[in-house]
Amino acid sequence: MRVLIYWSINGIGGAQRLYVMLAKALMECGVNVDILTNNRINLKLIEMMHGVRLNGINVRMVSSIPCSNSLCGLVNSTIRFQELINIINEYDLVYLDDLYLSRLIKHSGIIFYIHGYIDRKRPIAPLAKPHRMLPLAIQALGSSYDIIKNAKFVFANSYVTAYITYKTIGIMPKVLHPPVDVKLAGKYRSSIREDAVVSFGRLGSAKGHELAVMIISKLRERGIKAKAYIMGSVEDISSRIYAISLLKLAEELGVAGQVRLILNPSLAESYSVLGRSKVFIHGKPHEPFGIVVVEAMATGTVPVVPRSGGPWHDIISYGKYGLGYSTLDEASNAVEYLLGGGFNDYSKLAMERASEFSYEKFKDRLCSIIT
């Protein structure tokens, strides 16, 4: 069996982590895997960012225009998509997660993965991703849900995503939670923990990193001194501007010395910071899944998440394996409780729960369905 993975984006985020783990899992299922991309994949860089070796996988690279602006990115996406059309029939299965020009895809073996909520009758550009607004807006004009309706396998990243998809377009996907290498993450657990809050994800307003800064300020008002580590990828000008705004906010609130930004961290650096901190704060409400929440839990860090979306429903089970919040005060109270003595009990629960999202369980489920 031959499988093509249409690798449409690059970087450090959860979707990118899934590409890597999916390719590895399929290869270990005994499937021949090719990757199609124009992102100039560097296998050593992928190993550094995601902790996965992709030796044995063939990368089919499409020529692209060397540039970084949104319009140019749209052109490169179109070039890559045309190459996909040209070679798609060479494969038994094709993995996709992009609705762009979906009416042109004609294949009986499509694997489609839904990362975000399908809560509208027609695709639109997600407002939560201003760094990709132009290409996504233009792509949405030519998109439909036909590719999902005709796919051989449809997966969703959480039960929340699956339910919303069903309510919107009448299709109930199989739930395939994104995997985490919990064994690797566990190696970075430290028995000595800082009174620190970590926020981790792409640097952009949609991720809500400023919440970590505001919590540190609230704790300072209560006489509690704690640190905040904000880690994430910086891909363009908007993310750089956002990073600067976080530093300005810390200065305005008088906690600049307690806030540290870590830009484009390696996997080892990310896990090291998580593994020596006590609290992970997730600042984005209604997150479809939140793979970084599981990564934090695997290192023994206790998650504090909004009472919405996949983190609350699928991951911490309504507060059983972490704490939830709806307001800044509730988030600050949760962090204060964990720093004040609640950490140990919740840390054990978090580690136990993280094992349910292991790479091994992901691979077993994927293999049983696909092969």
Image (spheres, rainbow, N blue to C red):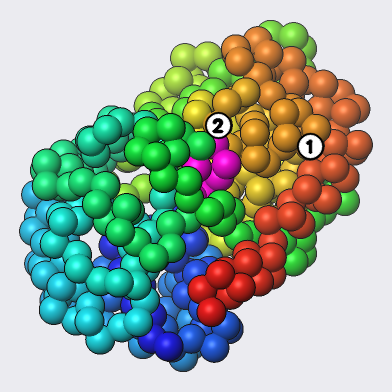
Q: Quadrant of residue 357?
A: bottom right
Q: Judge by depth and name the residue closer to the eye, 23 or 209.
A: 23
Q: Quadrant of residue 302?
A: top right
Q: Quadrant of the N terminus?
A: bottom left
Q: Nearer the viewer, mark 1 or mark 2?
A: 2
Q: Amino acid at mark 2?
A: Gly
In percent of the image, x 61 and y 73: which residue is there? 368
Stretch of the chain drawn in magenta? 156-162
Q: Kindly state the secondary structure of the residue where label 2 is placed.
A: helix
In percent of the image, x 51 and y 26: which residue is there? 285
Q: Does residue 23 belong to the magenta stretch? A: no
In percent of the image, x 52 and y 49: which residue is there? 157
Q: Judge by depth and name the residue closer to the eye, 52 or 254.
A: 52
**Residue lying furthest front in this view?**
170
Residue 282 position in % (x across, y down): 58, 33
Residue 177 position in % (x across, y down): 58, 53
Residue 150 position in % (x across, y down): 30, 59
Label 2 neighbourhood size at 10 Å, few (<14), some (14-19), many (20+)? many
In percent of the image, x 49 and y 61: which residue is there? 17
Q: Judge by depth and name the residue closer to the eye, 272 or 207.
A: 207
Question: Mark 1 and mark 2: span between their CA atoms?
Answer: 15 Å
Q: Are marks 1 and 2 in contact (CB under 8 Å)?
A: no
Q: Kindly state the secondary structure of the residue where label 1 is placed.
A: loop
Can residue 10 be seen from the camera position used here?
no
Q: Is residue 340 above or below residue 72?
A: above
Q: Amino acid at mark 1?
A: Tyr
- The residue carrying mark 2 is 309
Label 1 neighbourhood size at 10 Å, few (<14), some (14-19), many (20+)? many
Q: Is residue 301 left or right of residue 153?
A: right
Residue 47 position in % (x across, y down): 51, 74
The numbered mark at residue 321 is 1
